[in-house]
Image: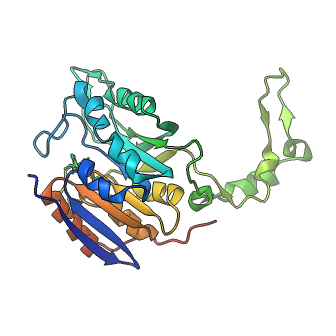
């Protein structure tokens, strides 16, 4: 159900989240050049036919490109676009509409900075004759410039106790770089780990699916947008989710202390988002490094 555009701002935890009920292609015009990070999960092709307008996989790339100008217009030059998405199986085989969409975006001038994977630690059970349980989704990081804003220190992790115990067992020989005997160029550089307290995380995010019913059929876990907000949006910056759904990105932005704007063209989902933003406690308020 689509409603006329309306805007409500929730102030919490020293920052704010604005929920705009409308079509993001129109509503983003009000945010021209202001957004540091768009992090979003668009409707999957045909996947939610009962819940909201769906697009046939063959038409998905062209449909997604109708958002291109508004996304580029809203993002700062230093900004990033993160798209969480997965190809659908059509007639027993993977349709490649996601690849076609990323190619179309690259053709329109976006830089493909990195492909992250969301590894689902609790994938849905089931039986498929030619496939196993589906345990991951893409998160594509695209940008307007080749060097978008990135604060790697904000997502560093503790190295863990194994480094000390492993290094304690190594001799002098093991602590310096060794080139392999066949000159392949591969070598160990164990000394790199000496005195390290934190390390960069990999580009695979292991997070469980959301079990709780929050009034929306396709909710992603708060930690997914939270990771990218910390990495790609400066403090004081503005985060946008143009397919806002139940407001998960807004909750993540509150937790990270960033301002945010969520846009959804379904009035019921905007109401669900406002309810969550007012009632759920912004978690994860850990200090960021760097
Ligand atoms: C996959 S859901 C997003 C779910 C969200 N990540 C969450 O955790 O709740 C995609 C959303 O895009 C919305 N949508 C579809 N077309 C839209 C448009 N043109 N403008 C704004 N929102 C749109 C749908 O109503 C739906 O809620």
In-front residue for pair 272/243: 243
The residue located at (31%, 59%) in the rendering is: 30
The residue located at (27%, 51%) in the rendering is: 243
Q: Residue furthest right?
A: 172
17 up-or-down from 69: above or below: below
Residue 210 in percent (x, y) is at 30, 54
Asked whether residue 146 is in view, the answer is: yes
245 up-or-down from 282: above or below: above
Going by the image, does 266 lie left or right of 60? Answer: left
Q: Quadrant of residue 199?
A: bottom right
Residue 290 in percent (x, y) is at 64, 65
Residue 222 in percent (x, y) is at 37, 59
Going by the image, does 146 lie left or right of 285? Answer: right
Going by the image, does 93 lie left or right of 77? Answer: left
In-front residue for pair 263/273: 263
How many marks are shown on the rendered structure?
Answer: 0
The residue located at (21%, 51%) in the rendering is: 23
Q: Quadrant of residue 238?
A: bottom left
Q: Quadrant of residue 53?
A: top left
Residue 272 in percent (x, y) is at 18, 63
In-front residue for pair 92/270: 270
Asked whether residue 218 is in view, the answer is: no
In-front residue for pair 175/255: 255
Colour logic: rainbow
Going by the image, does 13 lie left or right of 212? Answer: right
């Amino acid at each position: 159900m689509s409603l006329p555009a309306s805007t409500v701002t929730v102030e919490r935890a020293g920052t704010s989240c604005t929920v705009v009920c409308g079509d993001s292609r129109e509503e983003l015009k009000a945010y021209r050049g202001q957004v540091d990070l768009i992090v979003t999960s668009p409707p999957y092709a045909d996947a939610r036919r009962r819940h909201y307008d769906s697009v046939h996989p063959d038409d998905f790339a062209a449909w997604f490109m109708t958002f291109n100008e508004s996304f580029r217009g809203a993002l700062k030059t230093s900004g990033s676009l993160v798209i969480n998405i997965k190809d659908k199986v059509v007639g027993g085989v993977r349709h490649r509409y996601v690849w076609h969409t990323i190619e179309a975006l690259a053709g329109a001038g976006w830089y493909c900075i990195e492909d992250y994977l969301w590894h689902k630690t609790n994938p849905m059970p089931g039986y498929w004759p030619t496939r196993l349980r589906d345990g991951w989704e893409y998160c594509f990081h695209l940008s307007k410039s080749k060097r978008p804003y990135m604060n790697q220190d904000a997502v560093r992790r503790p190295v863990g106790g194994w480094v000390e115990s492993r290094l304690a067992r190594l001799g002098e020989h093991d602590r310096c770089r060794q080139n392999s005997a066949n000159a392949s160029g591969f070598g160990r550089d164990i000394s790199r780990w000496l005195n390290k307290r934190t390390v960069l995380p990999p580009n695979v995010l292991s997070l469980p699916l959301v079990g709780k019913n929050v009034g929306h059929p396709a909710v992603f876990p708060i930690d997914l947008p939270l990771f990218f907000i910390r990495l790609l949006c400066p403090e004081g910056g503005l985060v946008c989710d143009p397919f806002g759904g139940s407001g998960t990105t807004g909750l993540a932005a509150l937790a990270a202390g960033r301002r945010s704007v969520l846009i959804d063209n379904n009035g019921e989902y905007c109401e669900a988002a406002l309810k969550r933003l007012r009632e759920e406690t912004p978690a994860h308020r850990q200090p960021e490094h760097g």
